[in-house]
Image (cartoon, rainbow, N blue to C red):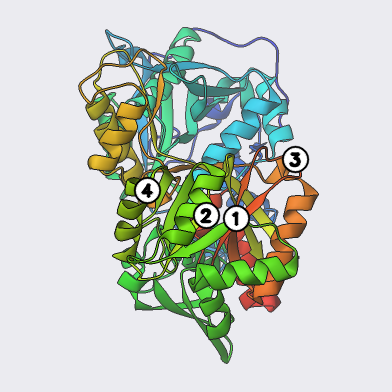
Amino acid sequence: MPRIAGHRRRTAVTRSPAMTDRSWRQPSEHQRQGMQDDVVLDMGWGRLVMGQTFADLGGIVHALRAEEVGERDICIYPRDPHVLVGLAPDELFIDPSYTFRLDLHRYRGRPELIRDVFVRTATSRADMEAVNEIYALNGMVVGDADIMWDNHRTRCFTYLVAEDRRTGRIIGSVTGVDHTLAFDDPEGGTSLWCLAVHNQDAPTGTGEALVRVLAERYVGRGRAYLDLSVMHDNEGAIRLYRKLGFRRVSAVCVKRKNPINSPLFAARPEGLEDLNPYALIIAEEALRRGIRVEVTDGGWGEMRLSVGGRSVVTRESLSEFTTAVAMSRCDDKRVTRRIMERAGVRVARGAVAGIDDVAAASTLMREVGAVVVKPARGEQGKGITVGVKGDAALQRAVDAAALFCPEVLVEELVPGQDLRVVVIDREVVAAAVRRPAEVIGDGRSTVAALIRSTSRRRERATGGESRIPMDATTTEVVAEAGYAMDDVPRLGERIQVRRTANLHTGGTIEDVTDQLHPEIAAAAVRAAEALDIPVTGIDFLVPEVGGTDYVFIEANERPGLANHEPQPTAERFVDLLFPETRRR
């Protein structure tokens, strides 16, 4: 880390910057006067190599070679970047990104506040952990929270977080670096890094609010400009930056050819763009390890992964390692229940029903009060009715389930949270509470409008995999909550709009891996072993995640690994397939 001096010039720079807006121009001795040499800033997720502070390009090569495994170093503002890459062409590449600059003396603020978004300075290490969760959700390299927090306690670095005013949750973050405080930059420059928002929950305008507040902080310090790097094909971000007054400059970034960066310098396999998020997360992890990826059916999520002379065909998290017998055990919920009972895993009371035979199910319903009706075979929550009471409702629910499978399973409705535990290679890798779709009132929009806007965010975040249906079930659930579709809920009011927590109908997921009780974890592993399946999502209902009580619901032979970031689900899956590529 460079020395952070105590006193710095605060007046705005009026002349046009000359060192960093022309990447091929050698700074003069006068321009470099007073500036520290060979500056490298540790950001926690990697290091910023400030190229304009290096008199010798060989020094930049040496600095980038010191990159830590699993991190992403970036050299910004190198002079003669083509020559720099030519010094180590097998190791370095020019990043396919643009550098945009906002001349801060020309910045104009927004006349009105962005609704539902409050931007503040990070105030604790816990904030840094929340920032890392957002990084993971966006596929970014996660940082070391301790380093980030130590950085933040100097004025050289600025970490801002955005809160949702309706919920108080952190839903966005941005990092700023003050070049004057970092290395006595004669240009008075600053830079913006790691702009990220929660792609499911962030209100519209969250990214703009973060950029504006950071810019205004540096305007207040009298800085000259704010720079950022953005991928050339990130059209949404580029539109935002142009709207705020940023212009392109010729500065470039240089990075190392490491596994994390491989999508940026190596040819991408054909068909990756056709994969859904559940298959893509696996493909990206494989590519990071140098595993060959061949998309054999993008719409189906199928691909062939190869290392050396060995290959494995996968469909999302399902692979050749899962036998047909194990799949059939998960496919029929009646069989799954019997296996769980023999393995000592607790299950809910249940009965089998058919269109013309609901007697046993009716008896169970009268004994337990309310039941869940579902097809014995099926997925994605199709045909499931929750909270059935009364013989007429039972018959309707059985008829609905029978549309998907003639055999119907009726189980006691057990209160609790819907918990998914992902078990890979007989180890718990992730645990998450799944919640039914809900909307949050803003004091202005109707329930119907809130559902539509929330559904659009979910759909964008999941590549079209998740959306809230505007159907009779949604209307019924809203009515049960005491609302009509054209009612306007109060600010912050939460309204559940679906009964089941299925992600395909807009359900959300919250990581609780660190809270999972060892007894429930052991039950999940026992269930996977009894099914003899290498990768599975075990579903429980639990009164509390940190407690020992649970009831087994079902096992999924193809759990969506992308739903469980920041937990290393894709990493453990590829470890299972190709243990020789495991990171030590």
| Label 1 vs 2, first from the N-terminus | 1
For the residues labelled 4 and 2, the Cα–Cα distance comes to 15 Å
**Circle 3 residues within 10 Å: few <14, some 14–19, many ≥20:** some
For the residues labelled 4 and 3, the Cα–Cα distance comes to 35 Å
Residue 128 on image: x %, y %: 64, 30
Residue at the disc numbered 1:
349
Q: Are marks 1 and 2 in contact (CB under 8 Å)?
A: yes
| Label 4 vs 1, first from the N-terminus | 1
For the residues labelled 3 and 1, the Cα–Cα distance comes to 21 Å
Q: Residue at x 42, y 25 (%)?
A: 226
Amino acid bearing label 2: Glu
Question: Which residue of the protein is positioned furthest toward the right in this rendering?
Answer: 518
Residue closest to the eye, 453 or 306: 453
Badge count: 4
Q: Residue at x 70, y 17 (%)?
A: 5
Residue closest to the eye, 163 or 49: 163
Q: Is residue 144 visible?
A: yes
Disc number lying in front (4 or 2): 4
Disc number lying in front (4 or 3): 4
Q: Secondary structure at mark 2?
A: strand
